C-alpha cells in the first residue's frame, strides 16, 4: 500500500495541473484506471496501473444538473438540501424520496443524453415538496438558477394534478371546485378543474396548500383516493415510471 498514491495526485502529475483540477476531472467521469472509469479522487492506484484522461475532458462540461423524480406514495419529499441517495429518512416510517435517486433508477432511454455520474447525486436541493401519501413529479437540482426560480416562483407556477376520487359529487360540485370554495377560512381563487374520466379529476392550480385538494373534494361530497402531480409550470413528468427519474433537458423551462 505504501506504493499506492491517490488518483487525484497521479492525474495532477500526468497533466501538470492542480490537485483540485484533477479532482474535478475525476468526478466528471473523464478518468479511467486500467480502462475502467473511476469517479473517486481518493481512490488508490499503483504505479503499474494505467491511468488515462479522456481527450475530451473539459471543466466546461461539469455543469450542474436537475433531476425529475416520479415519487411513489409513501416517500417523503420536503423542502431543503439533500445528498441524494446517501441521505436517510428524516421522519419515522417515511423514507426520503431522495434515496430513490441513483444509477439503477435512471430512466432507460433518457432523451437528455447526459452521462450519469455519482456527483449528480450530491448537493441537491428540493423546492417542490409533495405529501408523503401523494405521488408524482418532484424536482431536485444542483443549479442555483433553477433553485432560485423554484424558491421564488413556486407560488405562481401552475401545478397540474390527477386526483382519483370516490363518492357522488354534489349538484353543481364541479362548478364549485372551479370557483366558490374556501380553505382555512379564505376564499380560493378560480381553479381549473375537469373530469378526466368517471373517477379522476384534473386540477390545474397555483399556490396549492397542504390538505387543500382533499378539503376541496370533501366539500363537494368526494373523498380522495390518490393524488399524482404530473406537471410543474411548463415541465411535465412525462412517461417516467414510479421510482425512476430523468434529467431536465437544457431547453426545458419551468
Image (cartoon, rainbow, N blue to C red):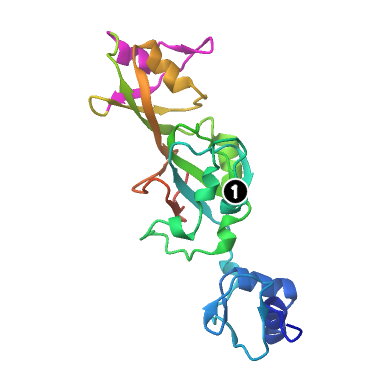
Residue 179 visible, this orientation = no
Above or below 190: residue 226: below
| Residue shown at 56% from the left, 52% from the top | 85
Which residue is outermost to the right?
2
Q: Which residue has dot 1 on it?
A: 145
Label 1 crowd (10 A; few <14 / some 14-19 / many >=20): few
Examine the rendered structure and indicate whether residue 215 appears above or below residue 158.
Answer: above
Q: Is residue 54 rendered magenta in the image?
A: no
**Image location of residue 211, percent across then percent down:** 49, 22
Q: Look at the image and tell me in which quarter the N terminus lies.
A: bottom right
From the viewer's perspective, tell me whether residue 71 is left or right of residue 98: left
Within the magenta stretch, is there residue 173? yes
Q: Residue at x 74, y 87 (%)?
A: 3
Q: Secondary structure at mark 1?
A: helix
Residue 253, percent from left and from top: 47, 47
Image location of residue 40, percent across then percent down? 63, 70
Residue 126 visible in the displayed image: yes
Number of numbered discs visible in the structure rendering: 1
* Residue 19 location, quadrant: bottom right
The correct choice, above or below, for 48 with respect to 68 in the image is: below
Q: Which stretch did the figure color magenta? A: 171-195
Q: Position of residue 101 (x, y in %)?
A: 51, 52
Q: Nearer the viewer, residue 137 or 102?
A: 102
Q: Is residue 186 above or below residue 78?
A: above
In-front residue for pair 153/74: 74
Amino acid at each position: 500500500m505504501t506504493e499506492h498514491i491517490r488518483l487525484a495526485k497521479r492525474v495532477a502529475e500526468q497533466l501538470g495541473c492542480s490537485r483540485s483540477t484533477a479532482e474535478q476531472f475525476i468526478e466528471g467521469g473523464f478518468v479511467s484506471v486500467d480502462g475502467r472509469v473511476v469517479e473517486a479522487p481518493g481512490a488508490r492506484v499503483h504505479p503499474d496501473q494505467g491511468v488515462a484522461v479522456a481527450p475530451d475532458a473539459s471543466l466546461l462540461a461539469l455543469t450542474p444538473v436537475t433531476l425529475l423524480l416520479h415519487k411513489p406514495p409513501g416517500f417523503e419529499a420536503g423542502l431543503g438540501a439533500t445528498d441524494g441517495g446517501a441521505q436517510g429518512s428524516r421522519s419515522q416510517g417515511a423514507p426520503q424520496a431522495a434515496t430513490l435517486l441513483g444509477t439503477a433508477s435512471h430512466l432507460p432511454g433518457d432523451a437528455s443524453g447526459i452521462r450519469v455520474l455519482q456527483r449528480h447525486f450530491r448537493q441537491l436541493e428540493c423546492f417542490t415538496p409533495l405529501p408523503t401519501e401523494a405521488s408524482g413529479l418532484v424536482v431536485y437540482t444542483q443549479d442555483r438558477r433553477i433553485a432560485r426560480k423554484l424558491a421564488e416562483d413556486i407560488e405562481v407556477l401552475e401545478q397540474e394534478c390527477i386526483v382519483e376520487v370516490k363518492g357522488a359529487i354534489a349538484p353543481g360540485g364541479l362548478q364549485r371546485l372551479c370557483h366558490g370554495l374556501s380553505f382555512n377560512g379564505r376564499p380560493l381563487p378560480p381553479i381549473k378543474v375537469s373530469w378526466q374520466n368517471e373517477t379522476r379529476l384534473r386540477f390545474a392550480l397555483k399556490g396549492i396548500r397542504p390538505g387543500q385538494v382533499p378539503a376541496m373534494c370533501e366539500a363537494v361530497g368526494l373523498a380522495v383516493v390518490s393524488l399524482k402531480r404530473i406537471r410543474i409550470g411548463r415541465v411535465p413528468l412525462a412517461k417516467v415510471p414510479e421510482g425512476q427519474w430523468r434529467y431536465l433537458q437544457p431547453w426545458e423551462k419551468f
